[in-house]
Image (cartoon, helix red, strand yellow):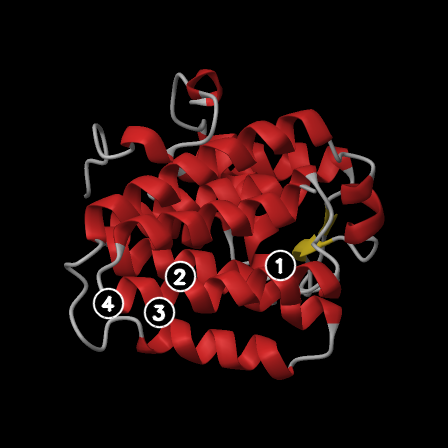
Amino acid sequence: MVNAAGKFGPYGGGDARVLPGRGPTGAELVRSRIALRVRLKSVAPGDRLPDAGVLGEELGIGEITVRRALEGMCQDGLLDRRRGRSGGTFVAADWDTVVSAMHDPAQAASLDAFHLLLECGLVAHGAGEVPAGRLDGLHTLVEEMNVADDGARLAELEARFHLDLAEALGGTEIREFAADLLGRQCLLRPAPPPAVVREQNRYHAELLTELGRGALDPAVRAVKSHHQVRGS
């Protein structure tokens, strides 16, 4: 796992006071990962979720914790519990409506600031050290965003870009950390509109170009410009 401490230097551009004082609880982790799965279209409203034991194994938390988290999400209206032979826990059909009532711009802005710090640190750590070919998948996502015309598809690709960027620059553990951040953001603010994603994608491409040639300062500027577009 990359230790980005000391790597931010003058590049953070965020407020260090938003850094979380603890990791997510088990319940928060379940909520964020399910929200991210919906954004990534791994599951859709109306789909049945894996059993609690499977989810617990995937997330590295106990089955009892998962069951309690799922029950809380049912109470919030995010999930539906059905009994019988075809029962289970399902993503609520009105997921988008329920989530929209939970949007919190202030909390979302704090997470955005922390996400900016994380990505600037990763770029500072990785600039000039990214092996040839590691960014190929990210270039493919940029190309897909250039031609996609569906808002949900663009939001999905945008999330995938940041997950894959975290892994390319920081490894699988940093990808998991980014997944939690992105999942929490999915619950706190609406998906970015297509026009915003397209403008952000310009900075995706710019970032990859600068990373490819090992240019630290321009790469960090691209990260900051991307986040400024999202926050405007």
- The alpha-carbon separation of the residues under discs 3 and 4 comes to 7 Å
Contact between labelled residues 2 and 3, with CB atoms less than 8 Å apart: yes
Disc 1 marks a residue whose amino acid type is: Arg
Amino acid on which the number 2 mark rests in the picture? Leu
Q: Position of residue 150 (x, y in %)?
A: 74, 75
* Pointer 1 or 4: first along the chain: 1
Residue 27, relative to residue 160: is it above or below? above
- What residue would you read off at disc 3? 209
Which class describes the residues within 10 Å of circle 1: few (<14), some (14-19), or many (20+)? many
Q: CA distance from mark 1 to mark 3?
A: 27 Å
> Dot 3: what SS?
helix
The label number, if any, that marks residue 207 in the structure image: 2
Q: CA distance from mark 2 to mark 4?
A: 10 Å
- Specify which label sits upstream in the sequence, 1 or 3: 1
Q: Residues within 10 Å of mark 4 (few under 14, many from 20)?
A: few
Give the residue at x 68% y 25%.
106
Mark 2, Cα crowd under 10 Å, few <14 / some 14-19 / many 20+, is many
Indicate left or right for 108 with 171 as reference.
right
Are discs 3 and 4 less than 8 Å apart at CB? yes
Residue matched to label 1 = 39
Q: Is residue 117 left or right of residue 112?
A: left
| Rendered position, 24 above or below 128 | above
Q: Is 84 or 208 nearer to us in this picture?
A: 208
> What kind of residue is marked 4?
Arg
Q: Which mark is residue 213?
A: 4
Residue 2 locus on image (x, y percent): 19, 42
**Kind of residue at disc 3:** Thr
